[in-house]
Image: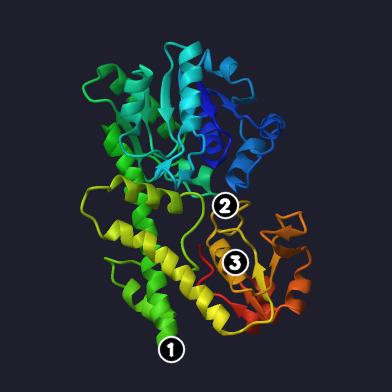
Amino acid sequence: MNIAVAGIGYVGLSNAVLLAQHNHVTAVDILPERVAALRCGRTPIADPEIEQYLSEKHLDLTAETDAEAAYCTADYVVIATPTSYDPHRNYFDTSSVESVVRQVISVNSRAVIVIKSTVPVGYTRRLREESGCGRILFSPEFLREGRALYDNLHPSRIIVGVPESNAEMERAAREFAKALARGAVEPNVPQLFMTLDEAEAVKLFANTYLALRVAYFNELDTYAEVQGLDSRNIIQGIGLDPRIGDHYNNPSFGYGGYCLPKDTKQLQANFAGIPNRIVSAVVEANHVRKDFVAGQIIAKKPAAVGVYRLVMKTDSDNFRHSSILGILRRLKEADIPVIIYEPLLEQETFEGCRVVHDLSVLKEQCDLILANRFCDELADVRSKVYSRDLSGKD
């Protein structure tokens, strides 16, 4: 098959690499530097498996800034463009998805469009009606940033949303799922086909459940800290119940990153007019957790607080919506001097805070160091570090 992928972020690039093992794939992006890197066989994002596959595997993969040239001959166009949450509209900003759909319609009347960007429930169905294009499917992704290709190679399931009573799109959906499964390492990956709305709901409810687990164990940790209890013992004790399990239970400063904050808010917005308590509570609990952590730090009356890394996850190159940013802003509001150590930052200041590029300076000049995840680099100043990390896991 000839496949075009719109967006060279972690979702788009990981899917492009996966599919390029057995198909001709053109990755499209509006950023020339991403296209240039990919043309040279380099990954523009941090992902060890993508780096490995680009250097070691034979991939039929090209990159292009000319979107129409890529779309005009494609059998499938996979849309993996960003859809940030717009708090003023209580809705994802889906303009990038709609832009790609318009471009594809204008140059290719036979291509099947597969949306992998996260969208509100009901969005794809409405887009098909409003655009007049009936060749649109929705296929949610379940990828971790920094391990996106690994998760595509070892998927827990492949889901494709299909318009009801549409045999042609049913066949197209099964062909696309087959292509994803063929690129995977895992054999016999479960494939589920459902309505467009149901597939969109799977994505939002799955991420909100993950956010719920984060919020739950953070709230447990808040209780333990206030009561002088050891969170590790409590979490280990309840995690041995096989119905709960010993996973996704490491306390933090709150859930963050690109997906969970926006997906929980979108699901909350989708619940407008529908009775709910848990979904709204998950969103609120994340704010409460950040307030609590900031309050604990402020109560210590530090002369200067150091922030060790802004990134949300180990080995990530992205700190969009990182939970530690919420703590940083609360400390600034309390007029506490904050110094940041983040190797990804080249500038001298960030959000009004001084940035240092030498970790020893942070250690020397701060009497308290904030770390969402502890690491060996901080071992020599462990007594200064405030972290709720118990296991070093994301």
Please tell me which residue is depicted at 40% across the width and 42% down the height of the picture: 91
- Measured as percent of width and height from the top left, residue 178 is found at 38, 28
Residue 159, by quadrant, is top left
**114 sits to left or right of 357:** left
- Measured as percent of width and height from the top left, residue 24 is found at 55, 21
Please count the marks in the image: 3
Residue 328: assigned label: 3
Three-letter amino acid code of the residue under disc 2: Arg
Q: How crowded is mark 1: few (under 14 residues within 10 Å), some or many (20 or more)?
A: few
Q: Can the viewer see residue 374 in this picture?
A: no
Q: Mark 2 points at which residue?
A: 320
Between disc 2 and disc 1, the foreground one is 2
Three-letter amino acid code of the residue under disc 3: Leu
**81 sits to left or right of 40:** left
Three-letter amino acid code of the residue under disc 1: Gly
Answer whether labels 2 and 3 touch (C-beta < 8 Å): no
Eyeballing the image, is 9 above or below 286? above
Which residue is nearer to you in this view: 341 or 390?
Answer: 341
- Measured as percent of width and height from the top left, residue 200 is found at 33, 39
Eyeballing the image, is 100 above or below 272? above
The residues bearing labels 1 and 3 have C-alpha atoms spaced at a distance of 25 Å
Please tell me which residue is depicted at 51% across the width and 65% down the height of the picture: 393
Please tell me which residue is depicted at 38% across the width and 59% down the height of the picture: 283
Answer whether labels 2 and 1 touch (C-beta < 8 Å): no
Residue 304, by quadrant, is bottom right
Which residue is nearer to you in this view: 12 or 290?
Answer: 290
